[in-house]
Amino acid sequence: MFNLVLFGPPGSGKGTQSTSIINQYNLVHISTGDILRVEVANATPLGLEAKKFMDAGALVPDEVVIGMIGSKLDENKEVNGFIFDGFPRTIAQAEALDKLLEFKKTPINLVLSLAVPEEELIARLVNRGKESGRSDDNEETARKRYHEYLNKTAPVADFYANQEKLVLVQGVGSVDEIFHKICLEIDEVKD
Ligand code: B4P
Protein backbone atom coordinates (compact mmCIF):
# COMPACT_ATOMS: atom_id res chain seq x y z
CA MET A 1 0.00 0.00 0.00
CA PHE A 2 1.04 3.59 -0.55
CA ASN A 3 -0.50 6.31 1.61
CA LEU A 4 -0.02 9.97 0.78
CA VAL A 5 -1.00 13.09 2.71
CA LEU A 6 -1.47 16.19 0.58
CA PHE A 7 -0.87 19.12 2.88
CA GLY A 8 -1.08 22.89 2.46
CA PRO A 9 -3.09 26.03 3.19
CA PRO A 10 -6.65 26.53 1.90
CA GLY A 11 -6.57 27.11 -1.84
CA SER A 12 -3.08 25.64 -2.31
CA GLY A 13 -4.41 23.12 -4.83
CA LYS A 14 -4.85 19.97 -2.74
CA GLY A 15 -8.18 19.08 -4.31
CA THR A 16 -7.02 20.07 -7.80
CA GLN A 17 -3.88 17.91 -7.66
CA SER A 18 -5.65 14.99 -5.96
CA THR A 19 -7.77 14.45 -9.07
CA SER A 20 -4.67 13.82 -11.19
CA ILE A 21 -2.82 11.81 -8.52
CA ILE A 22 -5.64 9.29 -7.99
CA ASN A 23 -5.74 8.58 -11.74
CA GLN A 24 -1.99 8.17 -12.06
CA TYR A 25 -1.47 5.97 -8.99
CA ASN A 26 -4.88 4.34 -8.53
CA LEU A 27 -5.32 5.55 -4.96
CA VAL A 28 -8.55 6.10 -3.03
CA HIS A 29 -9.22 9.82 -2.53
CA ILE A 30 -10.34 10.88 0.93
CA SER A 31 -11.14 14.60 1.10
CA THR A 32 -12.62 15.73 4.40
CA GLY A 33 -13.75 18.98 2.72
CA ASP A 34 -15.69 17.04 0.06
CA ILE A 35 -17.23 14.68 2.62
CA LEU A 36 -18.32 17.62 4.77
CA ARG A 37 -19.81 19.48 1.79
CA VAL A 38 -21.94 16.42 0.90
CA GLU A 39 -23.18 16.28 4.51
CA VAL A 40 -24.02 20.02 4.35
CA ALA A 41 -25.81 19.64 1.00
CA ASN A 42 -27.88 16.74 2.41
CA ALA A 43 -28.64 18.76 5.56
CA THR A 44 -27.71 15.82 7.81
CA PRO A 45 -27.27 16.53 11.56
CA LEU A 46 -23.49 16.32 11.03
CA GLY A 47 -23.72 18.67 8.04
CA LEU A 48 -25.84 21.23 9.88
CA GLU A 49 -23.31 21.28 12.73
CA ALA A 50 -20.28 21.43 10.38
CA LYS A 51 -21.78 24.26 8.29
CA LYS A 52 -21.55 26.70 11.21
CA PHE A 53 -17.80 26.18 11.45
CA MET A 54 -17.15 26.10 7.70
CA ASP A 55 -19.08 29.33 7.04
CA ALA A 56 -17.09 31.03 9.80
CA GLY A 57 -13.77 29.93 8.26
CA ALA A 58 -13.08 27.70 11.28
CA LEU A 59 -12.08 24.06 11.48
CA VAL A 60 -14.79 21.50 12.19
CA PRO A 61 -14.20 19.80 15.61
CA ASP A 62 -11.64 16.98 15.58
CA GLU A 63 -13.97 14.26 16.88
CA VAL A 64 -16.38 14.81 13.96
CA VAL A 65 -13.67 14.63 11.31
CA ILE A 66 -11.76 11.71 12.87
CA GLY A 67 -14.97 9.66 13.02
CA MET A 68 -15.57 10.31 9.32
CA ILE A 69 -12.07 9.11 8.39
CA GLY A 70 -12.43 5.92 10.45
CA SER A 71 -15.60 5.05 8.50
CA LYS A 72 -13.96 5.76 5.13
CA LEU A 73 -10.99 3.52 5.90
CA ASP A 74 -13.35 0.71 6.90
CA GLU A 75 -15.32 1.10 3.65
CA ASN A 76 -12.17 0.62 1.53
CA LYS A 77 -10.42 -2.59 2.51
CA GLU A 78 -8.61 -4.03 -0.55
CA VAL A 79 -7.04 -0.92 -2.07
CA ASN A 80 -3.63 0.25 -3.35
CA GLY A 81 -3.56 3.07 -0.86
CA PHE A 82 -5.11 6.36 0.12
CA ILE A 83 -4.59 10.02 -0.61
CA PHE A 84 -5.60 12.15 2.35
CA ASP A 85 -6.61 15.60 1.07
CA GLY A 86 -7.21 18.28 3.70
CA PHE A 87 -6.66 15.82 6.55
CA PRO A 88 -5.03 15.86 9.06
CA ARG A 89 -5.47 19.56 9.87
CA THR A 90 -4.55 19.45 13.59
CA ILE A 91 -1.98 17.54 15.66
CA ALA A 92 -4.85 15.59 17.29
CA GLN A 93 -6.05 14.51 13.81
CA ALA A 94 -2.50 13.51 12.82
CA GLU A 95 -2.11 11.38 15.95
CA ALA A 96 -5.51 9.78 15.39
CA LEU A 97 -4.62 8.96 11.77
CA ASP A 98 -1.38 7.26 12.85
CA LYS A 99 -3.39 5.13 15.29
CA LEU A 100 -6.04 4.21 12.69
CA LEU A 101 -3.35 3.20 10.19
CA GLU A 102 -1.33 1.30 12.78
CA PHE A 103 -4.43 -0.80 13.32
CA LYS A 104 -4.45 -1.51 9.57
CA LYS A 105 -0.69 -2.19 9.62
CA THR A 106 0.01 0.40 6.94
CA PRO A 107 1.82 3.73 7.56
CA ILE A 108 1.78 7.16 5.92
CA ASN A 109 4.57 6.94 3.32
CA LEU A 110 4.85 10.55 2.20
CA VAL A 111 3.51 14.01 3.09
CA LEU A 112 3.67 16.58 0.28
CA SER A 113 3.27 20.16 1.42
CA LEU A 114 2.14 22.64 -1.25
CA ALA A 115 3.68 26.08 -0.65
CA VAL A 116 1.71 29.09 -1.97
CA PRO A 117 1.94 32.74 -0.75
CA GLU A 118 -1.05 34.19 1.14
CA GLU A 119 -2.13 36.74 -1.49
CA GLU A 120 -2.16 34.10 -4.24
CA LEU A 121 -4.29 31.82 -2.00
CA ILE A 122 -6.83 34.57 -1.31
CA ALA A 123 -7.02 35.47 -5.01
CA ARG A 124 -7.66 31.82 -5.97
CA LEU A 125 -10.38 31.32 -3.36
CA VAL A 126 -12.17 34.57 -4.17
CA ASN A 127 -12.00 33.66 -7.85
CA ARG A 128 -13.39 30.17 -7.20
CA GLY A 129 -16.18 31.71 -5.11
CA LYS A 130 -17.42 33.68 -8.12
CA GLU A 131 -18.14 30.43 -9.98
CA SER A 132 -18.77 27.83 -7.27
CA GLY A 133 -20.89 29.92 -4.94
CA ARG A 134 -19.12 28.21 -2.01
CA SER A 135 -20.07 30.15 1.10
CA ASP A 136 -16.48 30.05 2.47
CA ASP A 137 -14.88 31.42 -0.72
CA ASN A 138 -15.04 35.18 -0.12
CA GLU A 139 -12.15 37.39 0.96
CA GLU A 140 -13.13 37.78 4.62
CA THR A 141 -13.69 34.05 5.22
CA ALA A 142 -10.65 33.08 3.14
CA ARG A 143 -8.42 35.25 5.39
CA LYS A 144 -9.97 33.67 8.51
CA ARG A 145 -9.32 30.22 7.05
CA TYR A 146 -5.71 31.16 6.37
CA HIS A 147 -5.24 32.30 9.98
CA GLU A 148 -6.88 29.12 11.25
CA TYR A 149 -4.37 27.26 9.07
CA LEU A 150 -1.40 29.17 10.57
CA ASN A 151 -2.60 28.58 14.14
CA LYS A 152 -3.81 24.99 14.03
CA THR A 153 -2.69 23.28 10.83
CA ALA A 154 0.84 24.56 10.13
CA PRO A 155 2.20 22.73 13.24
CA VAL A 156 1.18 19.43 11.61
CA ALA A 157 4.08 19.97 9.14
CA ASP A 158 6.56 19.69 12.04
CA PHE A 159 4.82 16.53 13.24
CA TYR A 160 5.60 14.86 9.89
CA ALA A 161 9.02 16.52 9.52
CA ASN A 162 9.96 14.78 12.79
CA GLN A 163 8.92 11.49 11.19
CA GLU A 164 11.08 12.42 8.14
CA LYS A 165 8.08 12.18 5.82
CA LEU A 166 7.58 15.83 4.85
CA VAL A 167 8.58 17.15 1.41
CA LEU A 168 7.91 20.73 0.27
CA VAL A 169 6.58 21.33 -3.25
CA GLN A 170 6.26 24.85 -4.68
CA GLY A 171 2.53 25.21 -5.47
CA VAL A 172 2.75 28.22 -7.81
CA GLY A 173 2.79 27.58 -11.55
CA SER A 174 0.54 25.69 -13.94
CA VAL A 175 -1.48 22.75 -12.60
CA ASP A 176 0.48 20.42 -14.93
CA GLU A 177 3.88 21.73 -13.81
CA ILE A 178 2.98 21.19 -10.17
CA PHE A 179 1.59 17.72 -10.92
CA HIS A 180 4.90 16.83 -12.61
CA LYS A 181 6.86 17.88 -9.50
CA ILE A 182 4.48 15.87 -7.30
CA CYS A 183 4.95 12.73 -9.44
CA LEU A 184 8.75 13.02 -9.16
CA GLU A 185 8.46 13.08 -5.36
CA ILE A 186 6.02 10.16 -5.24
CA ASP A 187 8.13 8.04 -7.62
CA GLU A 188 11.16 8.62 -5.39
CA VAL A 189 9.38 7.03 -2.42
CA LYS A 190 6.99 4.53 -4.02
CA ASP A 191 8.45 1.15 -5.07
P1 B4P B 1 -11.20 21.99 1.88
O1 B4P B 1 -12.30 21.48 1.10
O2 B4P B 1 -10.14 21.04 2.30
O3 B4P B 1 -10.67 23.06 0.87
P2 B4P B 1 -9.56 24.05 0.54
O4 B4P B 1 -8.56 24.10 1.64
O5 B4P B 1 -10.32 25.27 0.18
O6 B4P B 1 -8.90 23.76 -0.82
P3 B4P B 1 -7.74 23.07 -1.62
O7 B4P B 1 -6.35 23.28 -1.10
O8 B4P B 1 -8.17 21.68 -1.88
O9 B4P B 1 -7.75 23.94 -2.95
P4 B4P B 1 -8.26 23.63 -4.39
O10 B4P B 1 -7.48 22.57 -5.08
O11 B4P B 1 -9.73 23.43 -4.34
O12 B4P B 1 -11.72 22.73 3.22
C1 B4P B 1 -12.92 23.48 3.32
C2 B4P B 1 -13.37 23.63 4.79
O13 B4P B 1 -13.83 22.35 5.30
C3 B4P B 1 -12.34 24.08 5.82
O14 B4P B 1 -12.19 25.49 5.89
C4 B4P B 1 -12.91 23.48 7.15
O15 B4P B 1 -13.93 24.28 7.70
C5 B4P B 1 -13.52 22.17 6.71
N1 B4P B 1 -12.59 21.03 6.86
C6 B4P B 1 -12.11 20.26 5.84
N2 B4P B 1 -11.27 19.31 6.32
C7 B4P B 1 -11.20 19.50 7.67
C8 B4P B 1 -10.49 18.84 8.72
N3 B4P B 1 -9.66 17.82 8.47
N4 B4P B 1 -10.65 19.27 9.99
C9 B4P B 1 -11.48 20.29 10.26
N5 B4P B 1 -12.19 20.96 9.32
C10 B4P B 1 -12.06 20.58 8.03
O16 B4P B 1 -7.90 24.97 -5.15
C11 B4P B 1 -8.49 26.22 -4.83
C12 B4P B 1 -8.65 27.06 -6.09
O17 B4P B 1 -7.37 27.33 -6.68
C13 B4P B 1 -9.49 26.40 -7.18
O18 B4P B 1 -10.33 27.34 -7.75
C14 B4P B 1 -8.46 25.90 -8.20
O19 B4P B 1 -8.97 25.87 -9.52
C15 B4P B 1 -7.37 26.94 -8.05
N6 B4P B 1 -6.04 26.41 -8.33
C16 B4P B 1 -5.56 25.19 -7.96
N7 B4P B 1 -4.29 25.04 -8.40
C17 B4P B 1 -3.96 26.22 -9.05
C18 B4P B 1 -2.77 26.69 -9.72
N8 B4P B 1 -1.67 25.94 -9.82
N9 B4P B 1 -2.79 27.94 -10.24
C19 B4P B 1 -3.89 28.72 -10.15
N10 B4P B 1 -5.06 28.32 -9.55
C20 B4P B 1 -5.08 27.09 -9.01
Image (cartoon, rainbow, N blue to C red):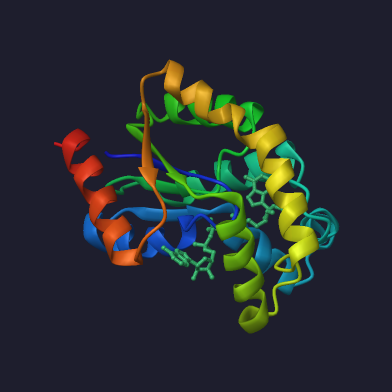
Q: Dividing the picture into quarters, in which one does residue 163 lie?
A: top left
Residue drawn 59% across and 53% down?
Answer: 32
Residue drawn 27% across and 60% down?
Answer: 177
Above or below, 189 against 187 in this view is: above
**Nearest to the observer: residue 71 or residue 110:** 110
Q: How many marks?
A: 0
Most extreme residue toward the bottom is 131
* Image position of 74 (left or right of 136): left
The reply to whether residue 96 is visible in this rendering is no
The reply to whether residue 88 is visible in this rendering is yes
Q: For the N terminus, which image quadrant?
A: top left
Residue 184, x across and y down, in percent: 20, 45
Q: For the C terminus, which image quadrant?
A: top left
Residue drawn 60% across and 53% down?
Answer: 10
Residue 79, x across and y down, in percent: 31, 49
* Image position of 100 (left or right of 135): left
Residue 39, x across and y down, in percent: 70, 65
**Nearest to the observer: residue 58 or residue 36:** 58
Give the quadrant of ligand 1: bottom right
Residue 24, x across and y down, in percent: 23, 60
Above or below, 14 against 4 in this view is: below
Most extreme residue toward the left is 191
Residue drawn 28% across and 65% down?
Answer: 176
**Nearest to the observer: residue 112 or residue 26:** 112
* Image position of 153 (left or right of 164): right
